[in-house]
């Protein structure tokens, strides 16, 4: 698959925003301007990437909080004094 130069730059800007990679973002924006992207187009790409970036973070936070709230099952070693009755089974 081959992407045109403009699409490649848009992808680079999006990836740099998603990774919060400022040096890469600076380079991609400069390349975009040199390739003829307007400032408005670059701002739109950045805005869309920031919106997308927020979605997974909220989902990851929600899932993490949910998992950490759930009681963890501990392995239980049965003994004559544990009181669970499992060693009599």
Image (cartoon, rainbow, N blue to C red):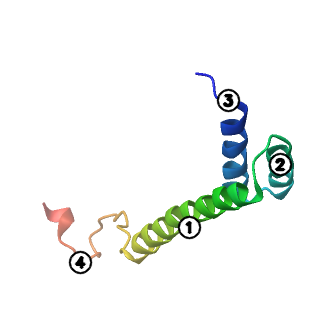
Q: Nearer the viewer, mark 1 or mark 4?
A: 1
> In the displayed structure, does residue 42 sit left or right of residue 49?
right
Location of mark 3 (residue)? 4
Q: 21 or 10: which is nearer to us?
A: 10
Q: 1 or 61: which is nearer to us?
A: 1
State whether residue 65 is above or below residue 76: below
> In the displayed structure, does residue 52 sit left or right of residue 86?
right
Q: Which circle's residue, 1 or 3, is located before the other in the chain?
A: 3
For residue 36, which quarter of the picture? Answer: top right
Label 3, residues with CA under 10 Å away: few <14, some 14-19, many ≥20: few
Q: Which mark is residue 54?
A: 1
> In the displayed structure, does residue 68 sit left or right of residue 73?
right
Location of mark 2 (residue)? 33
Distance from the alpha carbon under mark 1 to that under mark 3: 28 Å
Where residue 69 appears, x then y in whole percent?
A: 40, 77
Location of mark 4 (residue)? 83
For residue 71, which quarter of the picture? Answer: bottom left
């Amino acid at each position: 698959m081959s992407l045109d130069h403009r699409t490649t730059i848009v992808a680079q800007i999006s990836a740099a925003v998603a990774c919060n990679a400022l040096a890469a973002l600076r380079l991609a924006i400069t390349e975009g301007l040199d390739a003829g992207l307007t400032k408005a187009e670059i701002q739109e790409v950045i805005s869309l990437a920031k919106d997308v970036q927020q979605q997974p973070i909220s989902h990851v936070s929600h899932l993490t909080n949910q998992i950490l709230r759930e009681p963890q099952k501990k392995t239980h070693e049965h003994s004559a004094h544990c009181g669970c009755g499992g060693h009599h089974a």
